[in-house]
Amino acid sequence: HGNHDLTCREGAESSTGVTLSKSEVSSKFRDVTGPGAVYNASDAASLYYYVDNAAAGIRYIVVDVFDECQGSNVYWGVLPGVSQTQMDWVLGNAVMNAPENSKLVVISHFAPGFNTGVSTLNAALAALSAHEDYGSYAFSSRPDLELFLVLGGHQHHDMQLNRSGVWYVQSLSDACY
């Protein structure tokens, strides 16, 4: 999900509107991810998950880069960021428990390499790509994993960047909805 999924202004020039809580939208998102999506079972409103394509050897990891909200009375209440709960689940479950020889594709609303609001996630992805340990995560013990690509949208134009050995790709997104 992205910033437009949780917030809505009353008009293009308006500074009033509504911000929905994650729990208000999580069931709608879970309906479209399909039966193969694995969510954090201990976080009922989580909007981060993974899906495996076993035939291709790819694990798609979806990260919620708007993991916090300022409040329902703020028209633009989402903040870029990844909570520690999400980081622990993504790194500890989605990454460390990936099937042997998996290619990892991380997907989020924006590619984290282009946003400093998620610098902790960027550092973790760089360590994963280099097979270096990051905090309590022994990425060095999983040399079989390949961080293939980090994909996002949000910026409304295409660009790519290699930061610390990680390929970040921003794909064109269209806000004309």
Image (cartoon, rainbow, N blue to C red):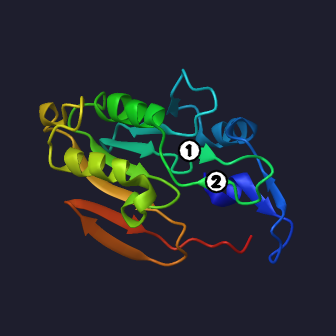
Q: Nearer the viewer, residue 75 or 161?
A: 75
Q: Nearer the viewer, residue 174 or 73?
A: 73
Q: Are marks 1 and 2 in contact (CB under 8 Å)?
A: no
Question: How far across and down, in percent of the image, does residue 118 sit?
Answer: 42, 53
Name the residue: 58% across, 40% down.
47
**Left or right of residue 53, residue 57 in this image:** left
Q: In the figure, 165 relative to 137: above or below? A: below
| Residue 139 circle label | none
Can you say which quadrant of the picture contains the C terminus? Answer: bottom right
Question: How far across and down, in percent of the image, does residue 43 sit?
Answer: 57, 26
Name the residue: 76% across, 55% down.
74
Instruction: Find disc 1 in the rendering and name its residue.
Output: 67
Instruction: Find disc 2 in the rendering and name its residue.
Output: 78
Q: In the figure, 167 relative to 20: above or below? A: below
Amino acid residing under circle 2: Val
Q: Quadrant of residue 76?
A: bottom right
Amino acid residing under circle 1: Asp
Q: Residues within 10 Å of mark 2 (few under 14, many from 20)?
A: many
Q: Quadrant of residue 98?
A: top left
Q: Earlier in the sequence, mark 1 or mark 2?
A: 1
Name the residue: 17% across, 37% down.
133
Q: Nearer the viewer, residue 70 or 163?
A: 70
Q: Nearer the viewer, residue 172 or 163?
A: 163
Asked which secondary structure carries label 1, the reply is loop
Name the residue: 25% across, 67% down.
162
Spatial separation of the CA atoms under disc 1 and disc 2: 8 Å
Question: How far across and down, in percent of the image, does residue 7 sit?
Answer: 73, 56
Question: How far across and down, in percent of the image, does residue 16 sit?
Answer: 84, 63
